[in-house]
Image: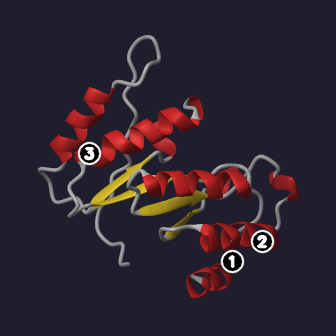
Amino acid sequence: MEIEGVFPPVTTPFDENGCIVHDHLTENIKRWNETDVSGYLILGSNSETVFLNDEEKLEIIKTSRRSIPSSKRMLVGTGLECTKGTIEFTRRAADCGADVAVIITPHFFKSNMSHETFMKHYLMVADSSPIPVLLYNVPPFKSGKIKIRRTGQIRKFK
């Protein structure tokens, strides 16, 4: 699968009580559908995912999928702090219509995370994922660097 073009990160609209406003999400996506974007990044770091539980995230994916035409790709942030949770949530996101899983680098225990640990995490997720996986590296969240040359293992692995 080729991923090229512009994929704006979609924010999650909340009301004054902190509840998700799905109608506003739908309106925003429909407005962007009138442009030449290639698709959308749902549940990225601009989506306030730290304030959402899994069921709310899945509802956002479903709402987004209904609003995004099949001609545009829906990338969905499915990375969590643990491999098992990331695998499970990635499968559930795929069931809701995600085209690509965007996996952020685990960072809570960053002082204990080596490049080999990251690679093991990503390889396990990629092996278990029903959809393509895109690595989402945010250097300020982690210690060390993911070695670009070694990430080719993931592409070859899948």
Q: Quadrant of residue 126?
A: bottom right
Q: Residue at x 31, y 49 (%)?
A: 65
Q: Quadrant of residue 30?
A: top left
Instruction: Find out whether the residues at labels 2 and 1 contact each other: C-beta distance under 8 Å.
Output: yes
Q: Residue at x 68, y 50 (%)?
A: 85
Q: Nearer the viewer, residue 149 or 156?
A: 156
Q: For the N terminus, which image quadrant?
A: bottom left
Q: Residue at x 36, y 43 (%)?
A: 62
Q: For the C terminus, which image quadrant?
A: bottom right
Q: Outermost residue, top direction?
A: 17
- Give how far across and how far down residue 43 sits, in percent: 47, 45
Residue 110 against residue 4 in the figure, above or below: above
Q: Which residue is mark 2?
A: 115
Q: Which residue is mark 1?
A: 147
| Side of 152 relative to 13 (left or right) | right
Q: Which residue is mark 3?
A: 66
Label disc, if present, on residue 14 of the rendered structure: none
Q: Earlier in the sequence, mark 3 or mark 2?
A: 3
Q: Earlier in the sequence, mark 2 or mark 1?
A: 2
Badge 2 crowding class, 10 Å Cα cut-off, few under 14, some 14 to 19, many 20 or more, is: some
CA separation, marks 3 and 1?
37 Å
Q: Outermost residue, left direction?
A: 34
Type of the residue with mark 2? His
Type of the residue with mark 1? Lys
- Give how far across and how far down residue 101 sits, in percent: 50, 61
